[in-house]
Image (cartoon, rainbow, N blue to C red):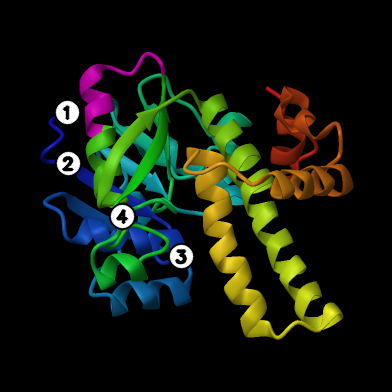
Amino acid sequence: MPAEALTVAVIGAGGKMGMRVSANLQKSAHTVFYSENSPAGQERVRAAGREITGTDEAVPDADVVILAVPDTALGAVSEAVVPWMKAGSILLTLDPAAAYAGLLARRADVTQAVAHPCHPSVFLERTTMEEWADTFGGQAAPQNVVAAIDEDAPGETKAAAEAVIRVIYAPVIDVHWVTVKQLAVLEPTLVETVACMIGTLLNEALHETVHTVGVPEEAAKAMLFGHVQIALTNALRGSNPFSEACEIAIQYGRDTIIREDWKKIFDDAELDKVIARMLKLESAAD
């Protein structure tokens, strides 16, 4: 499967992620078919200058089939799509939860891969206004991608998957290959359970500072936004040591806010539990 000339089918092309990946594929040299069932989604696809192709027509000739549908629909959609796929093709999903939970339909002659964007790093050295405006990634700001693929996938199949991954999330700095389980630990555990939760906690703390304590909002935002940057660069990159007084405040915060057993979120059972909740399943265990 030569990576430079592929046929790609996007299933769910009118959804949020479907529109994002389609925009980049439209600019590539690949032959791309866009499939979308909902009338509103079809309208968005056509408004972007792309034609709608039925799933039953888009899938059989595709080298790579991208399922850009909600996590909770991936099982049913893959059950419908995989039987139509040609031997040697790749089923590419954009989030690891369903793959980790074993919900995707399998065929011995179809390779499964999953690739999730890292989004532009908080430490990215942006040089243009377009890069500053692209906080999500996939437009102007470079980002990394973490991906997983079947262990027995041939080298050329992995290369073809990476070629498409680099297009849909472009501009891409690097694609980091891990196992499906490792990717599931990264998301949700590391970045959603921890990082995104802390982001919402910061927002709640800002609200309390402004609306309960009465600090002027602009002053509170100025102090918080600047200190978020210095906290991240000091803690994650070791740019500067925290002061002795700050270390005391940090420990008070940990003792007051953080549960002693919080690291249990990295246990397999807890990973299964949160993914089951995300997918609305009773259990995500293999």
Q: Is residue 75 visible?
A: no
- Of mark 3 and mark 2, the one earlier in the sequence is 2
| Label 2 to label 1: alpha-carbon separation | 8 Å
**Residue type, numbered disc 2:** Leu
Q: Are marks 2 and 1 in contact (CB under 8 Å)?
A: yes
Residue position for label 3:
16
Above or below for 132 versus 247: below
Residue 238 is left or right of residue 202, and the answer is left
**Residue type, numbered disc 1:** Met
Above or below for 34 versus 188: below
Q: Residue 272, percent across and down? A: 72, 31
- Of mark 2 and mark 1, the one earlier in the sequence is 1
Q: What residue is drawn where x is 27% and y is 35%?
A: 162
Q: Which mark is in front, 2 or 4? A: 4
Q: Main secondary structure of the magenta part?
A: helix
Residue position for label 1:
1
Residue position for label 4:
125
Q: Which range of residues does the magenta coloring cover?
A: 151-160
| Label 3 to label 1: alpha-carbon separation | 29 Å
**Residue type, numbered disc 3:** Lys
Query: Which quadrant of the rendered structure holds the C terminus?
Result: top right
User: Which label sits on residue 6?
Assistant: 2
- Of mark 1 and mark 4, the one earlier in the sequence is 1
Q: Are marks 1 and 4 in contact (CB under 8 Å)?
A: no
